[in-house]
């Protein structure tokens, strides 16, 4: 029998493209009218539990989800946000919607951000109370393919949704911006409900005395 010969062939390792790891960035949108401890806890907990690279509070210029109510000037809301995050090295502010003006549709914002930051995966943070309204969001079917929604659990709200969500546990802080505005209008204490420097700013500027 003829001995079969084997010929070794030298193969060159394929040169695979090096895929750069995308940055993971959280976005917490809202009116921040005013920003309070509940907002900061949500952003911080999602940042920490999902091991994000950065997390931004993103004030709306005009929210499409909020009924008619008095919202103070964007410049004051932004100044309060700057004060609120100045001691948090991993929290920042995203001003896309303020700079664009008009109605702040999340679809438009994410489309723009992904265009200028293609190396970023965005995690959009919402409270559990907003989950049931997701079907009403502008271009929601396209939006869920563009961004990962992250829902922060709250008592009394369902954890079911037809959309893919990441659920995050966070301390339950029953604080709302509307509650703070009402307290200010009645000269009631708002200490510990929002950062001291934000409280000082509100009093100095005489904000929310109309309700």
Image: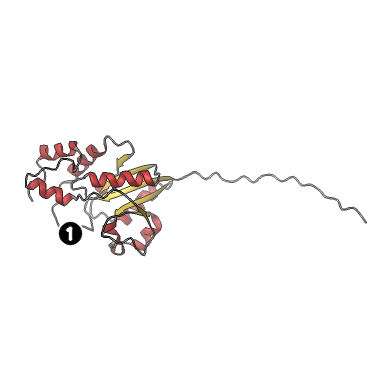
Q: Position of residue 109 (x, y in %)?
A: 32, 52
- For image coordinates 14% across by 55% down, the residue present is 69
Q: What residue lies at 11% left-to-right and 39% top-to-bottom?
A: 203
Q: Quadrant of the N terminus?
A: bottom right
Q: Give the vertical position of 135 relative to 10 (above or below).
A: below
Give the percent coordinates (x, y) of residue 5. 86, 51
Q: Nearer the viewer, residue 166 or 76?
A: 166
Q: Is residue 137 visible?
A: no
What's the image's color scheme?
A: secondary structure
- What residue is shown at x 23% (from left), y 44% (from top)? 37
Question: Foreground residue, 91 or 9?
Answer: 91
Question: Closer to the camera, 186 or 13?
Answer: 186
Q: Quadrant of residue 198?
A: top left
- Under circle 1, the secondary element is loop
Density class for disc 1 (Cα within 10 Å; few <14, some 14-19, many ≥20) is few
* Marker count (numbered): 1
Q: Which residue is mark 1?
A: 67
Is residue 119 shown left or right of residue 56? right
Left or right, residue 211 beside residue 159: left
For residue 19, say whether it is visible: yes
Measured as percent of width and height from the top left, residue 90 is found at: 34, 38
Quick one: which residue is furthest to the right in this view? Answer: 1
Name the spot of residue 162 as percent of width and height, x first.
Answer: 36, 65
């Amino acid at each position: 029998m003829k001995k079969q010969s084997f010929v070794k062939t030298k193969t060159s390792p394929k040169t695979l493209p090096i895929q750069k790891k995308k940055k993971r960035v959280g976005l917490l949108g809202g009116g921040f009218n005013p920003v309070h401890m509940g907002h900061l806890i949500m952003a911080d907990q999602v940042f920490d539990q999902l091991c994000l690279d950065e997390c931004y509070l993103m004030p709306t210029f005009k929210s499409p989800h909020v009924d008619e109510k008095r919202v103070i000037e964007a410049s004051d809301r932004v100044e309060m946000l700057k004060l609120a995050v100045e001691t948090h090295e991993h929290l920042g502010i995203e001003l896309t919607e303020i700079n664009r003006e008009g109605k702040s549709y999340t679809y438009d914002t994410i489309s723009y951000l992904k265009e200028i930051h293609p190396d970023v995966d965005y995690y959009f943070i919402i409270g559990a109370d907003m989950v049931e309204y997701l079907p009403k969001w502008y271009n929601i079917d396209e939006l869920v393919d563009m961004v990962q929604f992250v829902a922060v659990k709250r008592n009394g709200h369902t954890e079911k949704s037809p959309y893919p969500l990441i659920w995050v546990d966070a301390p339950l802080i029953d604080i709302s911006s509307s509650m703070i505005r009402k307290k200010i209008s009645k000269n009631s204490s708002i200490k510990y409900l929002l950062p001291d420097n934000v409280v000082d700013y509100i009093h100095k500027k005489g904000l929310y005395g109309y309700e």
